[in-house]
Amino acid sequence: MKIRQTFLFIVLSGLLFSLSNCRTHGPAFSANANAYMAKPVYRGENEGAFYLSGRLNSGYEYYDQEKNNSGELSAHLSFMSRHFFLSGGFFSYWGKYKVNPAVNPVTGGGMQPFNGGGLRTEIGARIPLQSQFEVLIGFNGEAFREGGKYAENSSDVFADIFTFGLNRVQINVAPALDLRFTPAGKWSSGLRYSFDTYFTATDLYEDNANSYLQRLTLHTTYDRVTLYGQLGFTPDRQRVSSIGLAYGIPFKKRGKE
């Protein structure tokens, strides 16, 4: 009886290992997960706002002759005081990934749709250097889950049984530095740098080459509207990019400090 159990365990382990090695693609959304969360412009008050955002992405491509485009809708709350800021919200996304069928027959080929959603947050400190210049330094992060035909074809169904599907959940943690110029009036602009690190909710797999990237974000705000563009640099010299627009609904100001 023990021999049969041992043999069964060896067979199952071998299948799990072989299926895990067949995985050739990670989440389509991973390299464009970190959007810019707009924040109120500080004018000497404690401020907060609710933001609605939309974004278009050109994402990471795992292999040659592939293409990855997506869109995103999101909503978040953002609060800023003299020396502290906090943002948080949720998002949903969708897109299509053109898969190279020569990589692995399991993934199929052609344009494969994907979709998903998740939560996003950021916390940090505000350092006012001058009356019209400030620095934001902190951490942001998010967790998202991906579904659709692309996710089904590129994941290991057998492995999902043992991980409760968590291998389709990915987490991003990124330290960020944001330099903001806030002249008098309704205008403000800034340049943001972040170092994005991605990992799955389980350690079942080793991440692909886009396990981290360096991202630059240029953002400009006029009154309640924020426009931003992003460019990410991956370790294997790929470029991921996005452009987005956010509309803010400010809370009632608390008065001068």
Image (spheres, helix red, strand yellow):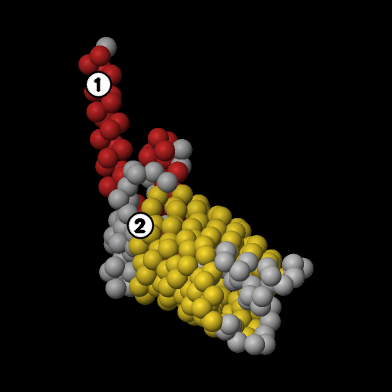
Residue 114 sits above or below residue 9 on the image? below
Residue at 25% of width from left, 14% of height from top?
2
Could one spot residue 92 in this view of the protein?
no
Residue at 64% of width from left, 72% of height from top?
40
Q: Secondary structure at mark 1?
A: helix
Residue at 40% of width from left, 35% of height from top?
162
Quadrant in which the N terminus appears:
top left
Q: Amino acid at mark 1?
A: Thr
Q: Residue furthest front?
A: 257
**x, y percent for residue 234:** 33, 69
Residue 85 sits above or below residue 160 on the image? below
Question: Front-most of 156 and 81?
Answer: 81
Q: Which residue is mark 2?
A: 25
> In the rendered view, does 256 fall on the left or right side of 204?
right
**x, y percent for residue 58:** 45, 73
Residue 194 sits above or below residue 221 on the image? above
Q: Secondary structure at mark 2?
A: loop
**x, y percent for residue 186:** 67, 85
Quadrant in which the C terminus appears:
bottom right
> In the rendered view, does 220 fall on the left or right side of 25?
right
- Asked if labels 1 and 2 touch by Cβ distance under 8 angstroms, the answer is no
Q: Rate crowding at label 1 as few (under 14), some (14 to 19) or many (20 or more) other CA atoms within 10 Å.
A: few
Q: Tell me how many marks there are.
A: 2
Q: Amino acid at mark 2?
A: His
Residue at 54% of width from left, 69% of height from top?
126
Q: Which residue is mark 1?
A: 6
> In the rendered view, does 154 fall on the left or right side of 14?
right
> In the rendered view, does 134 fall on the left or right side of 194?
right
> Quadrant of the rendered structure where residue 238 is?
bottom left
> Quadrant of the rendered structure where residue 99 is?
bottom left
Question: Front-most of 43 and 3?
Answer: 43
> Quadrant of the rendered structure where residue 177 is?
bottom left
